[in-house]
Amino acid sequence: MKIKGLSFLDESGLHHEAETFSLITKTAEDIGKLPPGIVVIEADRSLRTVIRFLSSLHRGDIVFMLPPQEFRNTDFLEYFRQSAGPLHLWAMDEKSPVISHEGNLSPKLQGMKNVFLVKTSGTSGMKNKFVLHSTELFLQKFSKRVPDFERTINFFPPDSIAGIETLLECMVHGKTLVNPWKEVEPSAVTNLLEKEKIDYLHVTPTFLNLMLLSGGLNSPHLKSVKMISFGSEPAQKNILEKIKTLSPQTSFRQIYGMSEIGLLKTVSHTDDPAWFQLDEKVNPWRVKDGFLEVKSESPMITYLNHDKEVVGGWFATGDAVQENGSLLKVVGRSDDVINVAGKKFHPIELEELLMEMDGMDDVMVTSEPNELIGNSVHVKVSSRMDEREFRMKLKVFLEEKVPAWMRPQRVIFDKSTDLSVRLKKRRKTSV
Amino acid sequence: MNEKIKLVLQSALERADLELAGVKLLDLKSDQPLFGGKGSALDSLNLVAFIFILEDEFKKITGKSVKISTQDILSKEECPFRNLDALGVWLAKKEEVLK
């Protein structure tokens, strides 16, 4: 793998390309010879993590980054080891990876070089799938693209596919990656946008809404931002419209991607960025029974702990989509369809309706099995209004605008938005 | 029906009227059909919502958790949700069992 280095800005200041390049090559040499195994890095948002990840790839290792809570969870590590084989654990405070397990490398990993693993998001604990990727495919993908930014924020967790792609894209093109060294919360990101003259921001729609509510998307903060991308979960049209009004000079783009296929290049519809177009030549796609299937430039090699047939390169995403000519809109996952007395809908459909109500700051729709009606609909709302006044207003809104079968059976009033560690709505947790 | 259960019912009816679309229960006479009969006040979607409210208010007022299952509603010869009188009697028995 050719390493160019990247400019990296963190609490300690700006580290230029030459410095990061030298750190990567020196760290790669310092590791020394390792027996076959997987280098598991305890990953935070520091330059140290970035250097360790890139230097391991530079050596041709099999690399897996884990956030501290999983790195230090012995049950989780044992679960991973059973699928993978011997692990070289590289804790924050260690100088080199420590061989902590012996055994045989998984047949799926034998002979593999310069590859990395990510785990799928969504379900937690012992249900994660471990996805194996070739670094070379990502580097080839980025070398064919001309990036339309100079400085971006490393918003997504470093161990996620979006975090890794952002890092590799910056590295291939020598761009500057700005690290939010404090908590990734709206005011911190807003401050970085302005202070570090960020021209490209990639976040989740939920986080965009939180920035909007905190006043972080007013024009002074967005002066330098030319493009905002959003992905990882369906985007609500109403939120995007509000942001477009506040910042007409900023372009918006829906990013489509998954741990298994990486992030795909898209062009968003100018009027409604939740609708997007995939480049047919790069990513052929088709819709089967309402669900998107796609070919990627950076498909996974395999799952370590799961069998899934990928016929002819078509990956069944499990994402339900609406089609409008060549445009697509993601409306949900195959497993989040709500079925009320035989009528089916996706949470995003009700969320979009409810966001039209005055005083509604944010909303999350989930469901629970119910013997009487199939699923009961649960809604968690966030509003700055008085609760009683809000509920009275909501009742009228439901009567006038929402079909009876989509109306919630339970409404939880809350001031906060429940975010997962990947900074998107935690739908799996029932409200 | 004891005072606590009367209070549970009253609070649940008030909340249902405040929150549930198309529902008006406060004016309902205690022997008028609540669920299941001709012209009943609740359809099955609203019944499920009303049950969530009832469980919340029961906990708030009696300090005890009650889970109202579909079996409670459908397997009885006489549905406890057929009217407010029946519901009050049934809730009082539930509370007695939980003592």
Image: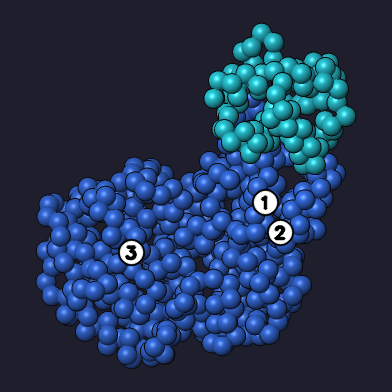
Count neighbours of disc 2 (C-alpha within 10 A) and say few if under 14, some if 14 to 19, many if 20 or more.
Answer: some
Residue A1 visible, this orientation? no
- In whole angstroms, how far apart are the C-alphas of marks 1 and 2? 8 Å
Q: Earlier in the sequence, mark 2 or mark 3?
A: 3
Q: Is residue A82 above or below residue A145?
A: above
Residue farthest to the front? B3
Count neighbours of disc 1 (C-alpha within 10 A) and say few if under 14, some if 14 to 19, many if 20 or more.
Answer: some
Q: Which residue bears the numbered disc 3?
A: A68
- The image shows residue A238 at horizontal and vertical percentages of 73, 60
Identity, as a three-letter code, of the amino acid under mark 3:
Pro
Same-chain status of marks 1 and 2: yes
Q: Quadrant of residue A327?
A: bottom right
> Which chain appears blue?
A
Q: Which residue bears the numbered disc 1?
A: A413
Q: Nearer the viewer, residue A117 or A155?
A: A155
Q: Nearer the viewer, residue A326 or A37?
A: A37
> Which chain appears cyan?
B
- In whole angstroms, how far apart are the C-alphas of marks 1 and 3? 32 Å
The chain identifier of the residue carrying mark 3 reads A
Q: Is residue A3 above or below residue B5?
A: below
